[in-house]
Image (cartoon, helix red, strand yellow):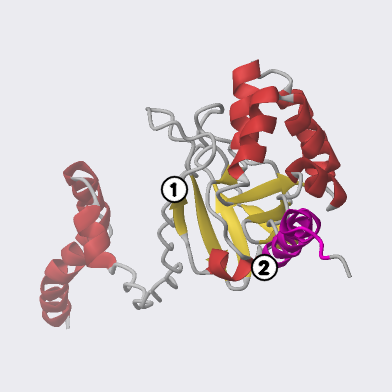
Amino acid sequence: MRRLPLAAVLVVFLPLAVSASGAKEAAKAPAAPPAPPNITAAMAKGGCKAFAALVAASPDARSTFQSAGDGGVTAFCPSDDAVRSFMPRYKNLTADGKASLLLFHAVPVYYSQRSLKSNNGVMNTLATDGSANNFNFTVQNEGEQVTIKTDASDHAARLKSTVYDKDPIAIYALDTVLEPVELFKPAESPAPAPAPAPVADAPKAPKKRRHRPAADAPGPAAAADDTSPADQKKNSKKSASPAAPCLRWLAALPVAVAVAAALA
């Protein structure tokens, strides 16, 4: 029996051994992590088609949203009805203003809904650039309801539903568009309530007047006192004139009696 040369054996079996070893190494290597989902596609699928279309139409916003997904991002997309009613104001913004408004709807941190409820307070957004333009909003909880408040609106936006939630990306639907104070006038503070008017005292009942007895009618003397001096003089003459003849008769009466006695 002829023996094969050693070189021929190595040529035949060495490639087989190398390929088998390579297969084992390939089996041991971990699978590559799945690529993060397309954020705008996830928004559109979850009921935020109008907002997703605005992000896709803005090159700056689209690229920033997608690159933020690698390190963790939480996005808040307004519902289609909310975007539709806001469009007249959105069209008046510049291109930079539109991009800032869209990026204002996301924070560069992944928050599950549970962690979002326990992290109340001011948050930076993807529009925050570290300069005077802060582009911050405030997350608050009202019971089980998560709300987002900005200084440009006196009404807080409410979280309606979860669109997508898988680390490192979370997307939540809102009932209104978030308005940054850097682009819109701040909301006016409500006027203080007027002070209550003082309560008027109840009208007091009129005091009962005591009826005094009527004064007695003035007597003759009082009437006389009230007359003038001229009237008093006239009255004295009148009262004296009828009495004068009587006095004269009384004076003549003794003389008549004496005459009658003498004649008798």
Q: What residue type is labelled 2?
A: Lys
Where 97 falls versus 147 (above or below)? above
Q: Is mark 1 on a helix, strand or loop?
A: loop
Residue 10 magenta-highlighted: yes
Where 7 falls versus 136 (above or below)? below
User: Mark 2 vs mark 1: which is more N-terminal?
Assistant: 2
Which residue extends farthest right?
1
176, 52: nearer the viewer: 52
**Image coords of residue 80 (percent x, y):** 83, 43
* The N terminus - image quarter: bottom right
Where 18 falls versus 66 (above or below)? below
Q: What residue type is labelled 1?
A: Pro
Residue 165 disc label: none
Where 236 falls versus 61 (above or below)? below
- The residue singled out by tag 1 in the image is 192
**Image coords of residue 116 (percent x, y):** 56, 64
For image coordinates 63% across by 46% down, the residue present is 69
Which residues, given as a range, are shown in magenta? 3-27
Q: What element carries label 2?
A: helix
Callout in the foreground (2, 1): 2
Q: Can residue 91 be seen in this view?
A: yes
Give the image quarter of residue 31: bottom right
Q: Can residue 163 be seen in this view?
A: no
